[in-house]
Amino acid sequence: MANKIRKLIQDLVEAGFHEIKDSGKGSHRKYTHSLYPGAVTISGKSGEDSKLYQEKQVRRAIEEVKI
């Protein structure tokens, strides 16, 4: 079963990412970290199921900042 979008966001925030305010359109949100080049974009409402590519992107971003 897929994680919810809110779980991906929670994982990013716990890893030290923070949301870039007023950067996304509609249900898109961007998260950045001082050790991560670029930003992670999460699309979808918080109660929706996440897509596999979103989970992989979040997992890779968190692993990259922990190294």
Image (cartoon, grey):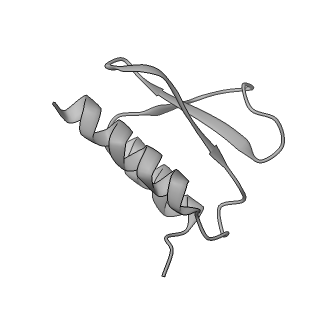
* Rendering coords of residue 36 (x, y %): 37, 22
Q: Is 8 or 64 nearer to us in this picture?
A: 64
Q: Is residue 67 above or below residue 2?
A: above
Residue beneath the point at 27% across and 32% down: 64
Q: Residue furthest front?
A: 53
Q: Residue furthest bottom?
A: 1
Query: Quick check: 60 left or right of 40?
Result: left
* Rendering coords of residue 9 (x, y %): 50, 51
Query: Quick check: 44 left or right of 42?
Result: right
Q: Is residue 62 above or below residue 67?
A: below
Q: Is residue 66 above or below residue 26?
A: above
* Rendering coords of residue 47 (x, y %): 66, 69
| Quadrant (top left, top right, bottom left, bottom right) of the C terminus | top left
Residue beneath the point at 58% across and 64% down: 50
Residue beneath the point at 67% across and 69% down: 48
Count of numbered circles in the view: 0
Which of the 4 image quarters holds residue 33?
A: top left
* Rendering coords of residue 18 (x, y %): 48, 31
Query: Quick check: 64 left or right of 54?
Result: left
Q: Is 56 or 39 nearer to us in this picture?
A: 56
